[in-house]
Amino acid sequence: MFSNWFKKSPQRVYAPPAPKRPADRRAATMTLKGKPAPLTERIKADIRNQICSLTDVPKHEQKFMVSEATISIQSGGDLHRFVWAFVEIGIEKSRAVSLADGINRRASAMQNVERQLALGIKEAIWQHSGLQCFSGELPETEVTALASSHKHADGHRFRLDTGLLVGGRLTFPGLQWGCKCLQKPLIPGIDE
């Protein structure tokens, strides 16, 4: 009866996939490693809010998922690790891919805006990816309205400190769930 009280839960350890063999055995492989982009407290708080708002993630697994998300995003968007973490807590793989991709895209969009502001870039141009934004979770009428508003925003200039009014709300490319839009920064003195 008391033996189960002192059992520790097994430690979860991520094992990255084995590297793939080059196409030609004589070809050299090269690994480039850059300094990981630090996540600001604002981005960490957003990741925490995104994960805690998911009904798929049980409350007792939220701390683990926030930790794995942070590690994944800091290492340049390691979606394999992020998907592994979702599957590890019992989420179906296809759903895990969707969740990891959505949270990663949002964090990347926030990182891009913060980096560009730090470099003194104040404006950007919204670029529609040409792909369908928004699918899956939202009702079809809402998907159509949001997708058309994102398509209409293509080519519009916006300030990086405020965003662009799209579909009735201020946002940035890639910030909304399912958005695949990009931004082209306008470098002062060059793109004016």
Image: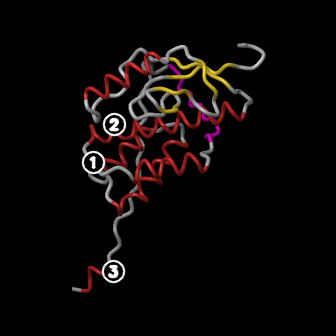
* Front-most of residues 126 and 80: 126
Q: Gap in Å between the C-alphas at discs 1 and 2? A: 11 Å
x, y percent for residue 123: 66, 24
**SS for tag 3?**
helix
Q: Amino acid at mark 2?
A: Ser
| Disc number for residue 98 | 2
Is the residue marked by circle 1 packed among few (<14), some (14-19), or many (20+) residues within 10 Å?
some
Q: Which residue is mark 3?
A: 6
Left or right of residue 69: residue 139: left
Please report whichever mark, 2 or 3, sits nearer to the chain's N-terminal start.
3
Is the residue marked by circle 3 packed among few (<14), some (14-19), or many (20+) residues within 10 Å?
few
| Disc number for residue 91 | 1
Q: Which residues are magenta?
A: 27-37
Residue 9 image-quadrant placement: bottom left
x, y percent for residue 102: 40, 36
Colour scheme in use: secondary structure
Q: Gap in Å between the C-alphas at discs 2 and 3? A: 37 Å
Is 144 rendered above or below residue 53? above
Please report whichever mark, 1 or 2, sits nearer to the chain's N-terminal start.
1
- Which residue is found at the position 32% from the left and 76% from the top? 7
Considering the whole magenta stretch, tell me its main secondary structure.
Answer: loop
- Asked if disc 2 and disc 3 are in contact, CB closer than 8 Å, the reply is no
* Front-most of residues 172 and 86: 172
